């Protein structure tokens, strides 16, 4: 199927089931495969892209993720709902790197993105495509950050937005939803429980469900993470990427980017080894990976303060596990305590205040270096998925208050 020319130059062709291969029309609203419930992935006419542009065109384009419009799903520019998300920096971690005995260590910092987490990428894409297909009412189950992001993009698109999150999600996420005018419901349970409410309400509430990987275009937004890494590294790739994994859109999106770049002939080196980092309090992927299973068991009593990682069974588990294996990467779980120590370590050595999820990759790296799964000479990129500012209520502080007449020479 070919799409012909369109105003945004998107070369979106159709959607393909990642399980059974069935194809679906991308100009109608789709969720999951109607035959096998598999995750649908957007397919592009890459031959057309290859003849239309070369990778050098991006140099002169605006610094946000829609610069990759040929490889994005929105056909009409007017439907793009953007807050300038994307093109976040890749920072060198010189001090922390040398502490770990590495010559070179990189971190891509999505703490610097609208709404403070990389969820902005996925929801900018999903809300834009939903708008293009006529949706006016969206609903989402979320561990927290996707709720903040969907509220912002929903507001910008003029949509009615319903958010369902665990009652103990970070306060900042609740505040975001309220300020953006979303309808926020707290659930006495986890993201899967919130997901059930959203799925059941579909008919009676006529909302469009933008749940992680049950909607095809959040992955397309996350794909720009991989496109940016390649472009920023002058069309080369790191040897290893460590990614804090919850529902897995990021890892699926990056892998899809590397695949498309390979098919386009824009990157000619091996794809990175992909590692998932999870918390010991909720590590279904690590368990399934170690046991060489193709899907995850439901993780009972999932507990972690890194809210984005609190996903007891990712819907796309089979896809994530496939990527971890195909890339010859792996999976590692780290203790809750070590996540917050790593957060302080990164902030105090490098000036980067990462979300606990992103900080978990530091501890993951340290353990994978110890076990020999990653080598000190590897070119490693850590993905920081969000800003620590959203989680300040987790930072224990016992702070001293000075009297205005204090003698500064007595301070230590
Ligand atoms: C959602 C989230 C994650 C996990 O993302 P997935 O791509 O769904 O695995 C990691 N970090 C933060 C800060 C998040 O909000
Ligand atoms: Zn299918």
Image: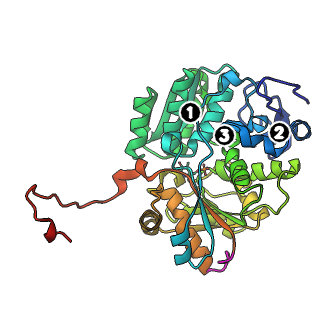
Q: Quadrant of ligand 2?
A: top right
In the rendered image of this protein, does residue 82 appear above or below residue 262? Answer: above
- Cα gap from disc 3 to disc 1, whole angstroms: 10 Å
Q: Quadrant of residue 375?
A: bottom right
Question: Is 355 on the left-hand or right-hand side of 385?
Answer: left
* Residue where numbered disc 3 is placed: 65
Q: Secondary structure at mark 2?
A: strand
- Cα gap from disc 2 to disc 1, whole angstroms: 25 Å
Whichever of callouts 3 and 1 sits on the residue coming sooner in the sequence is 3
Q: Is mark 3 within 8 Å of ligand 1?
A: no
Q: Position of residue 144 (x, y in %)?
A: 48, 43
Q: Which residues are magenta?
A: 371-377
* Residue where numbered disc 1 is placed: 83
Whichever of callouts 2 and 1 sits on the residue coming sooner in the sequence is 2
> Is the residue marked by circle 1 packed among few (<14), some (14-19), or many (20+) residues within 10 Å?
some
Q: Position of residue 309 (x, y in %)?
A: 53, 54
Q: Quadrant of residue 211?
A: top right
């Amino acid at each position: 199927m070919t799409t012909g020319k369109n105003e945004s130059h998107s070369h979106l062709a159709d959607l393909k089931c990642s399980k059974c291969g069935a194809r679906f029309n991308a100009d109608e609203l789709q969720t999951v495969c109607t035959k096998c419930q598999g995750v649908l992935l957007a397919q592009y006419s890459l031959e057309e892209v290859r003849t239309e542009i070369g990778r050098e065109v991006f140099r002169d384009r605006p610094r946000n993720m829609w610069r990759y419009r040929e490889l994005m799903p929105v056909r009409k520019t007017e439907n793009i709902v953007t807050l300038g998300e994307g093109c976040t920096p890749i920072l060198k971690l010189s001090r922390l790197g040398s502490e770990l005995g590495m010559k070179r260590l990189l971190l891509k910092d999505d703490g610097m993105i609208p709404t403070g987490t990389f969820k902005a990428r996925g929801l900018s894409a999903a809300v834009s495509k939903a708008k293009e297909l006529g949706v006016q009412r969206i609903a989402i189950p979320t561990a927290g950050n996707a709720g903040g992001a969907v509220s912002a993009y929903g507001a910008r698109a003029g949509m009615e937005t319903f958010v369902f999150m665990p009652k103990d999600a970070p306060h900042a996420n609740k505040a975001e939803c309220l300020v953006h005018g979303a309808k926020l419901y707290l659930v006495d349970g986890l993201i899967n429980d919130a997901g059930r409410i959203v799925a059941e309400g579909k008919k009676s509430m006529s909302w469009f469900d933008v749940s992680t990987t049950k909607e095809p275009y959040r992955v397309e937004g996350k794909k720009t993470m991989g496109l940016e890494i390649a472009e920023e590294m002058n069309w080369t790739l790191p040897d290893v990427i460590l990614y804090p994994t919850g529902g897995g859109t990021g890892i699926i999106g990056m892998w899809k980017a590397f695949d498309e770049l390979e098919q386009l002939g824009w990157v000619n080196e091996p794809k990175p080894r992909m590692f998932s980092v999870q918390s010991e309090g909720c590590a279904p992927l690590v368990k399934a990976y170690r046991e060489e299973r193709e899907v995850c068991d439901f993780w009972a009593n999932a507990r972690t303060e890194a809210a984005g990682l609190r996903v007891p069974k990712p819907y796309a588990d089979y896809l994530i596990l496939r990527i971890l294996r195909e890339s010859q990467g792996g999976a590692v779980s780290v203790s809750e305590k070590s996540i917050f120590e790593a957060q302080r370590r990164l902030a105090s050595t490098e000036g980067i205040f990462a979300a606990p999820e992103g900080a978990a990759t530091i501890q993951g790296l340290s353990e994978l270096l110890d076990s020999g799964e990653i080598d000190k000479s590897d070119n490693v990129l850590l993905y920081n998925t969000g800003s620590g500012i959203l989680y300040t209520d987790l930072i224990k502080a016992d702070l001293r208050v000075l009297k205005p007449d204090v003698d500064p020479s007595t301070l230590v």
